[in-house]
Image: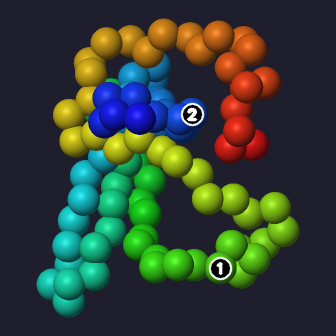
Amino acid sequence: MDLATTANLWIPVCCERVMRFNLFIQKNGTPYGSLVCTVCNKSVSFELEHQAHLTEYGEGARALSMLGSPKPPKDVRRKVDENAAMNDKTL
């Protein structure tokens, strides 16, 4: 696979647009990320953990492939094909 294509991945969407991903480094050197909606300003924060054991986060916990873009498109997000979930190997 090249850089332009990848296997199925989750796209963070809010207000029908792809959310912006920002990466920050705290003064102590600890990185964290934040997804932000450019329309309503809702945000979700992410903390980096190296080689986390998924069982520590509860039964059924999964690692997901997710898109993060500091400059996402401003276009309204198209609706996904109804059969897309049936072909998703991340579920």
**Which of the two labelled residues, at mark 1 and mark 2, occupies the earlier sequence position?**
2
Disc 2 marks a residue whose amino acid type is Asn
At 31% across and 12% down in the image, what residue appears?
A: 75
Image quarter where the N terminus lies is: top left
| Label 1, residues with CA under 10 Å away: few <14, some 14-19, many ≥20 | few
State the residue lying farthest toward the right. Answer: 59
Instruction: Identify residue for label 2.
Output: 8
Image x and y of residue 52, in percent: 57, 78
Image x and y of residue 80, in percent: 59, 14
In the displayed structure, would residue 45 be above or below residue 67?
below
Instruction: Identify residue for label 1.
Output: 53
Local SS, label 1: loop
Image x and y of residue 10, in percent: 54, 37
At 65% across and 79% down in the image, what residue appears?
A: 53
Q: Image quarter for residue 38? A: top left
Q: Is residue 36 visible?
A: no
* Mark-to-mark CA distance, 1 and 2: 23 Å
Q: Image quarter for residue 76? A: top left
Local SS, label 2: loop
**Colour setup of the view:** rainbow
Q: Do callouts 1 and 2 mark residues in contact (Cβ within 8 Å)?
A: no
The total of numbered circles placed on residues is: 2
Residue toward you, 58 or 54: 54
Disc 1 marks a residue whose amino acid type is His
| Label 2, residues with CA under 10 Å away: few <14, some 14-19, many ≥20 | some
Q: Image quarter for residue 60? A: bottom right
Q: Is residue 91 visible?
A: yes
In the rendering, which numbered label is found on residue 71?
none
At 21% across and 78% down in the image, what residue appears?
A: 26
In the displayed structure, would residue 63 be above or below residue 12?
below
In the displayed structure, would residue 21 be above or below residue 39?
below
